[in-house]
Image (tube, coloured by chain):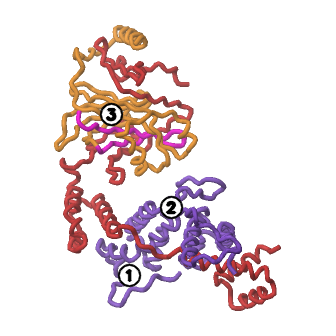
Chain colours: A orange, B red, C purple
């Protein structure tokens, strides 16, 4: 927690000294209302068995165990290693961030429930400090979204977003 | 010790690739060379056994399903290319008796496909895409095989190979009231990153890892 | 290469089914599938010795053929053309899979394993039941084929199962005539070695 505090202090100072300080977004006092939960993951797709073996990975919950196999039907690689994951609430009014790694992450804005189930979402795919793509999508549980990311180390990075069933 | 050409002769004789003259010449060699003859006969026997035990035709398991699956994929192909009304061929095969049981299910799924995944569809859909960079191109499609929706991006700059991509395993976040910042916690309860804003109100992701080199 | 059995008189010719398929008639294509699925499945099965995967690959082959139909000029028999597509599908799939050892497959993915009791007859014993010996040989052959590399499996199957001439094999793979012959020779020698005990004791 000390780290967070230190960063806040620095940020606070930065905000105060900046010329055109935008107003700090008013935050609700308690946890914001949520519309849904999403699971986001960054997957490293590769044909190099050694790369795959030495890549640090995360344990994926059973519900998403078939994701690598499904990725294989779209992306022509042999191995799919989940290197980061993040289970996140999608806030009703506030923006949500899905950050399985610091290099590639997603901003998620709820646009309310979709007709016939699922969620209307505005998604922004970020790489470092830049938006690569903005999209309006309907996400339904059981139907993941695969976002093809940049190539890396002879393979490719793929961002996976899944709407969790129920709330 | 046989020469490579002798091996080829043996092969060509066995497989009937020799002319009549060559064949006669080779067979007289066989008559006078017991070792070669033995080898030739062994090869012949192996050939015959291979042909016996490797049938050219085999019954396909679930043969009807094999056919109907292909038809489903053909229909999906057609829908992806032509949102226009179905061609005569589609409805023609609905009259086939063996397809009748599957026809109801097929008709529903084909109808859904033709109407471009209406609200009743279980598939995620990407409605609109905006790519700020002119170098990058985006398109989306649905993969039936993966049962997933894909947002394909082309023209992205490759990540440098020496870049160390550190994965998180985030299960909890806390929105802090002091500043517009969200703390991201890993499985051990420790903060792994903070999503904050910079002076332009743009996202600023801060971690405790050493700066990339 | 020998054509599959010609259709009965009164049965629709391949060429007519192909033309109708090219016009988008999926029912005509369905008839082609029925006509050739046995041969295509046998081919994929012999190459990979796994029923489920072979079934999937046979499906892929027909789907690819449907998509490629507009480009089929009918300058060869439909089956020959279909065969080439299947062959490419299987070969691409094999290349993607891991290959262990010095280019030869391990047999861990094969379904056929020699039963514990199915050993070669020791010298001096009475000749075993012929039918049992045949079944054992069949299983042993499947197992031996599985041990060959994709390149060697290809040529031996094209030669022995499809009955192709060397020129046809060279065109299908594709490779040179010399390569066809050296691979065939190696494959046969290797199979002989793997099946040595099956041949030792007879006459």
Mark 1, mark 3: which one is toward the viewer? 1
State the residue at coordinates (19%, 59%). Answer: B108
* Chain for disc number 3: A
- Disc 2 element: loop
Q: Determine which residue is flagged by label 1.
A: C15
How many marks the image carries: the answer is 3
Asked whether A163 falls inside the magenta stretch, the response is yes
Residue B173 percent coordinates (x, y)? 33, 22
Compared to A65, does A34 lie above or below? above
User: Which of the image's four quarters has the N terminus of chain B?
Assistant: bottom right
Q: Which residue position is annotated with label 2?
A: C111
Q: Residue at x 66, y 80 (%)?
A: B44
Alpha carbons under labels 1 and 3: distance apart? 52 Å
Asked whether the viewer can see residue C197, the reply is: yes
Residue B60 sits in which quadrant? bottom left
To which residue does mark 3 refer?
Answer: A124
Q: Is residue A50 above or below residue C102?
A: above
In the rendered structure, the residue with mark 2 lies on which chain?
A: C
Residue C56 placement, left or right of B17: left
Between A57 and A21, the one nearer to me in the picture: A57
Q: Dot 1 falls on which chain? A: C
Tell me which numbered mark, 1 or 2, is placed earlier along the sequence. Answer: 1
- Tell which tag, 3 or 2, sits nearer the viewer: 2
Give whichever of C144, B77 is nearer the camera: C144
Query: Residue C83 at what x, y percent from top left?
Result: 48, 72
Q: Are marks 1 and 3 on the same chain?
A: no
SS of the residue under disc 3: strand
State the extent of the magenta-drawn residues as a range. Answer: A142-167
Q: Give the x, y percent position of residue C96.
A: 52, 54
């Amino acid at each position: 927690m000390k780290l967070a505090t230190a960063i806040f202090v620095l940020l606070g100072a930065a905000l105060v000294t900046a010329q055109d300080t935008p107003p700090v977004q008013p935050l609700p006092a308690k946890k914001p209302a949520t519309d849904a939960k999403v699971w986001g993951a960054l997957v490293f797709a590769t044909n190099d068995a050694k790369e795959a073996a030495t890549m640090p990975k995360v344990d994926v919950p059973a519900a998403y165990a078939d994701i690598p196999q499904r990725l294989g039907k779209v992306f022509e690689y042999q191995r799919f290693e989940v290197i980061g994951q993040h289970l996140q609430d999608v806030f009703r009014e506030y923006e949500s961030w899905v950050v399985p790694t610091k290099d590639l992450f997603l901003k998620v804005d709820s646009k309310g429930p979709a007709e016939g189930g699922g969620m209307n979402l505005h998604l922004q795919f970020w790489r470092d400090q830049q938006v690569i793509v903005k999209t309006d999508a309907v996400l339904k549980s059981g139907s993941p979204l695969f976002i093809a990311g940049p190539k890396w180390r002879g393979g490719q990075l793929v961002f996976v977003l899944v709407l969790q069933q129920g709330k | 010790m046989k020469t490579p050409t002798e091996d080829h002769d043996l092969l060509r004789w066995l497989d009937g690739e020799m002319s009549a003259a060559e064949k006669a010449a080779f067979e007289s060699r066989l008559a006078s060379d017991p070792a070669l003859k033995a080898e030739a006969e062994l090869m012949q026997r192996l050939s015959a056994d291979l042909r016996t035990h490797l049938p050219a035709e085999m019954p396909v398991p679930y043969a009807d399903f094999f056919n109907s699956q292909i038809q489903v994929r053909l229909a999906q192909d057609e829908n992806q290319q032509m949102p226009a009304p179905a061609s005569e061929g589609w409805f023609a095969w609905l009259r086939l008796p063996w397809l009748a049981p599957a026809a109801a299910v097929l008709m529903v799924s084909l109808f859904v496909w033709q109407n471009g995944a209406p609200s009743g569809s279980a598939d995620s859909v990407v409605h609109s895409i905006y790519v700020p960079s002119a170098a990058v191109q985006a398109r989306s499609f649905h993969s039936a095989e993966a049962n997933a929706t894909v947002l394909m991006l082309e023209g992205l700059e490759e990540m440098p190979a020496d870049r160390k991509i550190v994965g998180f395993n985030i299960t909890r976040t806390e929105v802090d009231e002091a500043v517009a910042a969200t703390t991201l916690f890993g499985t051990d309860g420790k903060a792994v990153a903070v999503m904050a804003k910079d002076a332009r109100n743009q996202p600023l992701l801060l971690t405790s890892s050493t700066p990339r080199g | 290469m020998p054509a599959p059995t010609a259709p009965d008189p009164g049965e629709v010719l391949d060429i007519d089914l192909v033309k109708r398929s090219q016009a988008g008639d999926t029912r005509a294509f369905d008839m082609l599938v029925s006509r050739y699925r046995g041969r295509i499945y046998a081919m994929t099965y012999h190459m990979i010795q796994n029923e489920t995967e072979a079934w999937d690959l046979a499906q892929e082959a027909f789907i690819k053929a449907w998509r490629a139909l507009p480009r089929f000029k009918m300058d060869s028999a439909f089956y020959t053309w279909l065969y080439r597509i299947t062959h490419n599908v299987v070969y691409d799939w094999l290349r993607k899979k891991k290959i262990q050892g010095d280019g030869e497959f391990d047999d861990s993915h094969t379904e056929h394993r020699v039963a514990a009791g199915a050993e070669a007859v020791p010298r001096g014993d009475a000749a075993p039941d012929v039918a049992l010996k045949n079944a054992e040989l069949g299983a042993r052959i499947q197992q031996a084929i599985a041990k060959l590399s994709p390149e060697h499996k290809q040529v031996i199957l094209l030669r022995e199962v499809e009955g192709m001439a060397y020129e046809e094999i060279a065109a299908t793979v594709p490779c040179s005539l010399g390569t066809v012959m050296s691979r065939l020779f190696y494959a046969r020698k290797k199979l002989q070695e793997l099946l040595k005990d099956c041949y030792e004791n007879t006459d």
